[in-house]
Image (cartoon, rainbow, N blue to C red):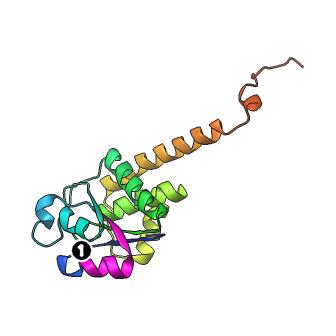
Amino acid sequence: MTGPGLLGPLPLRGGSRRLVAEENVRGVLTLNEEYETRFLCCSAQEWEAMGVEQLRLSTVDLTGVPTLENLQRGVEFVLKHRECGNSVYVHCKAGRSRSATMVAAYLIQLYQWSPQEAIEAIARIRPHILVRPRQVQILERFHRNVIAEAAAESQQELPETIQLLPTTRTSS
């Protein structure tokens, strides 16, 4: 992840303290369903005891696609921790599809990159990612929303006199 963050597989319980101590992880974004992490990973309460906030956005493995709402919630979670200078560990089971989709959404939001640019940036660091066609489709919708929001914000920033100028045609 560009900026203070990590993308990877399940953070197994035995390595969780190292993530907190060595990587300054203060947020964990889990894209697994609860049954996938129950016995191998820290619970939300265990993370909290280490000073880490966990956000679980359950997404079905292999065929699952995060919703637009969950992409937005995940990106906001990462941005909130990033503003505090903390790292966020974004994961699914293998760190290849669901979590890569979420990190791509983060990069789209941060840099207004296209989905392809975001996926390629992640693949340069983590070549074995696999963002499936339906995940690319949701990223394209997310990208359209980001671009529309940016356009609306830039329109609001125009001086009032420019916004109010009528469009008139004059005869020549």
- Name the side, left or right, on which 169 lies relative to 127: right
Asked whether residue 151 is drawn in magenta, I would say no
Give the prevailing secondary structure in the magenta stretch.
helix
Q: Is residue 114 visible?
A: no
- Name the side, left or right, on which 76 lies relative to 45: right
Question: From which residue to which does the magenta span run?
Answer: 16-28
**Who's the residue at 31% across and 64% down the image?**
99
Count of number-bearing discs = 1
- Residue type at mark 1? Pro
Q: Look at the picture and state if 84 lies above or below 23.
A: above
| Foreground pick, 34 / 121 | 34
Q: Quadrant of residue 155?
A: top right
- Name the side, left or right, on which 135 lies relative to 12: right
Q: Is residue 157 visible?
A: yes
Residue at numbered disc 1: 11
Q: Look at the picture and state if 145 lies above or below 7.
A: above
Badge 1 density bin: few <14, some 14–19, many ≥20, Cα 10 Å: many
